[in-house]
Image (cartoon, rainbow, N blue to C red):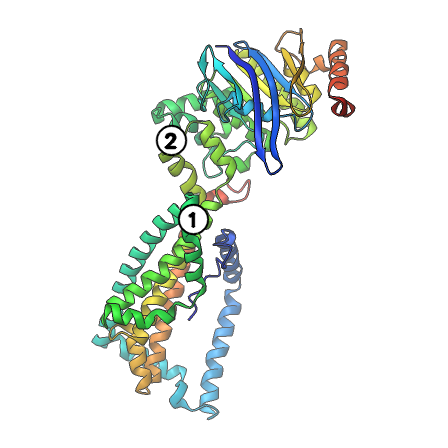
């Protein structure tokens, strides 16, 4: 379960150059679209060939053609549609609650030294351990329906948001605090004019990792303990040897995640235009 | 409005006990006067400026403006210009200039209007919509000066404002701003470790000793402002420079 953040490591919560690094990383990838496409095509072709040659049992990994066919079949299946709606609903609620909790907690821990010293170790500890070990507890607390997925997503999401928001607040330049004080800023105006925009890179990174991890939380909970959603369907199909159906769902989810990621990157770049290099707009 | 500093001492807590930064400093700055404070590095001149602006509480002594004690920053009375400019990179130039007014709750329209005027005062009107990082260091410092001027303060408190600039820019920007501020009758307290700057700007130079900073002496510069850069080539300038040099040269630190 990859619910760890690349943005933060235990001990040094959320390096805020994470957003920058991630952005430049993706830009480099975007420049290599033809290469990425070629590699993907080769992988798919290799998969088809390996199965057709009988090197791997088709019952275990299916074939690309079968998966595409399954995709068409599943898109008409009302059970799949309901599972998608349930999952998106769970993700929305989970991200909403997790991000709100994370933003508030991150701001408080970022700005209050005493509370930070008291609670940051707890956050760092939670960040470090694989949170899937808590899944059995979530069944005990929340039963089997949509709720455990939402709750688990909230846990995963809010931790990511907290550490990144703290990192964002830390990245606000000390000279800007001094300037704001010298120019008589009230606490509210200090917050809206200096802290919030200064912490924006960390906030953005936090929300991005938050939505990713909320999604992971929701799907993982469905996969293991729930009886609703796409995670549950993937488990059901796999255990019934409907590998083509299971993979079709997995690839569909992957495509959605990638699309959301690209939309997010676009949004983030639009909102951080001030970071463009000197002369870019003159 | 006269700025009064009486019998000021400042100590810092450090690992090795109390550190005395400034000791028994008394100073009076008249309205519209240019006062420069010079001294060896670490003599507490920057600390002194922060106390003048209400950013730091003195350990002993007091600062007042016409009898009203200065206990917290009030940019309407004394506005800072920092060495690192401290402009907000996500705001445009004009948004940076009007920031103090927005903090003070002035209406957006009035703030924008005042900011535009002050931007013109420093000669940067055409860059109102640019971002700070699109400007050179010298231009950014002009923006910071405009931001301070927008508060229409009794005093500008300039903390080594040209310290991060190259020699050429430093001289021409210093001359230009000095002339512009003279024209507006602005009172200025300028901290510097540059002999040239200290003399060129000053009606009066306050010379501090090495730590703990005490006032060694005050030197009046008679030349009327605004001054041209040619003032730097006069015998008067050379004379004061020699005097300052002997006052703050390193060997003096040992004996002081």
Q: Residue furthest bottom?
A: A54
Against A75, is A18 above or below? above
Quadrant assignment, res B163:
top right
Res. B94 image quadrant: top left
Could you give the CA–CA distance between mark 1 and mark 2, rounded to whole angstroms?
A: 23 Å
- The answer to whether A83 appears left or right of A280 in the picture is left
Q: Which residue is mark 2?
A: A186
Q: Which mark is residue A116?
A: 1
Q: Position of residue A145 (x, y in %)?
A: 22, 71
* Relative image position of residue A182 (x, y in whole percent): 47, 27
Viewer-nearest residue: A62 or A66: A62
Residue B168 numbered tag: none
Q: Disc 1, disc 2: CB below 8 Å?
A: no
> Which of the chains bears the disc numbered 1?
A
Which quarter shows the C terminus of chain B?
top right
Relative height, residue B161 to residue A123 (above, below)? above
Left or right: where does residue A98 sit relative to residue B117?
left
């Amino acid at each position: 379960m990859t619910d760890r953040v690349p943005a933060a490591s235990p001990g040094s919560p959320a390096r805020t150059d994470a957003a920058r690094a991630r952005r430049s990383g993706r830009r480099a990838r975007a420049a290599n679209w033809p290469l990425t496409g070629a590699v993907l095509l080769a992988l798919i072709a290799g998969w088809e060939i390996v199965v057709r040659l009988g090197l791997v049992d088709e019952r275990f990994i299916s074939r690309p053609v079968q998966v595409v066919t399954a995709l068409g079949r599943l898109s008409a299946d009302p059970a799949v549609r309901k599972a998608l709606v349930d999952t998106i609903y769970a993700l929305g609620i989970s991200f909403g609650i997790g991000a709100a909790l994370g933003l508030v907690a991150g701001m408080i821990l970022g700005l209050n030294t005493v509370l930070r010293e008291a609670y940051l170790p707890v956050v760092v500890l939670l960040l470090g351990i694989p949170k899937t070990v808590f899944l059995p507890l979530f069944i005990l607390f929340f039963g089997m329906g949509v709720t455990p997925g939402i709750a688990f997503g909230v846990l995963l999401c809010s931790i990511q948001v907290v550490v990144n928001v703290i990192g964002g607040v830390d990245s606000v330049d000390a000279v800007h605090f001094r300037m704001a004080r010298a120019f008589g800023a009230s606490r509210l105006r200090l917050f809206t004019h200096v802290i919030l925009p200064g912490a924006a890179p960390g906030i953005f990174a936090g929300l991005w990792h938050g939505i990713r991890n909320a999604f992971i939380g929701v799907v993982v909970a469905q996969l293991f303990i729930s009886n609703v959603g796409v995670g549950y369907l993937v488990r059901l199909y796999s255990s019934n040897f409907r590998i083509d159906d299971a993979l079709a769902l997995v690839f569909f989810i992957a495509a959605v995640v990638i699309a959301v990621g690209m939309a997010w990157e676009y949004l983030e770049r639009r909102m951080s235009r001030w970071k463009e290099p000197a002369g870019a707009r003159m | 409005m006269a700025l009064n500093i009486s019998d000021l001492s400042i100590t810092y807590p450090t690992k090795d006990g109390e550190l005395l930064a400034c000791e028994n400093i008394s100073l009076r700055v008249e309205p519209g006067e240019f006062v420069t404070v010079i001294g060896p590095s670490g003599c507490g001149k920057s600390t002194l400026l922060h106390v003048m602006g209400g950013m730091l509480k003195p350990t002993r002594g007091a600062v007042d403006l016409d009898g009203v004690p200065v206990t917290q920053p009030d940019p309407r009375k004394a506005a800072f210009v920092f060495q690192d400019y401290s402009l907000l990179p996500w705001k445009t130039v004009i948004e940076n200039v009007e920031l103090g007014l927005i903090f003070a709750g002035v209406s957006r329209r009035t703030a924008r209007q005042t900011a535009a005027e002050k931007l013109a005062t420093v000669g940067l009107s055409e860059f109102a919509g640019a971002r700070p990082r699109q400007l050179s260091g010298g231009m950014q410092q002009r923006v910071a000066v405009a931001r301070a001027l927008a508060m229409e303060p009794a005093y500008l408190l300039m903390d080594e404002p040209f310290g991060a600039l190259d020699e050429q820019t430093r001289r021409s920007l210093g001359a230009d701003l000095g002339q512009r501020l003279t024209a507006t009758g602005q009172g200025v307290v300028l901290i510097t470790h540059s002999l040239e700057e200290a003399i060129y700007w000053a009606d009066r130079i306050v010379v501090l000793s090495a730590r703990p900073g005490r006032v060694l002496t005050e030197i009046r510069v008679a030349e009327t402002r605004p001054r041209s850069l040619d003032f730097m080539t006069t015998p008067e300038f050379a004379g004061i420079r020699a005097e300052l040099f002997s006052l703050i040269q390193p060997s003096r630190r040992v004996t002081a």
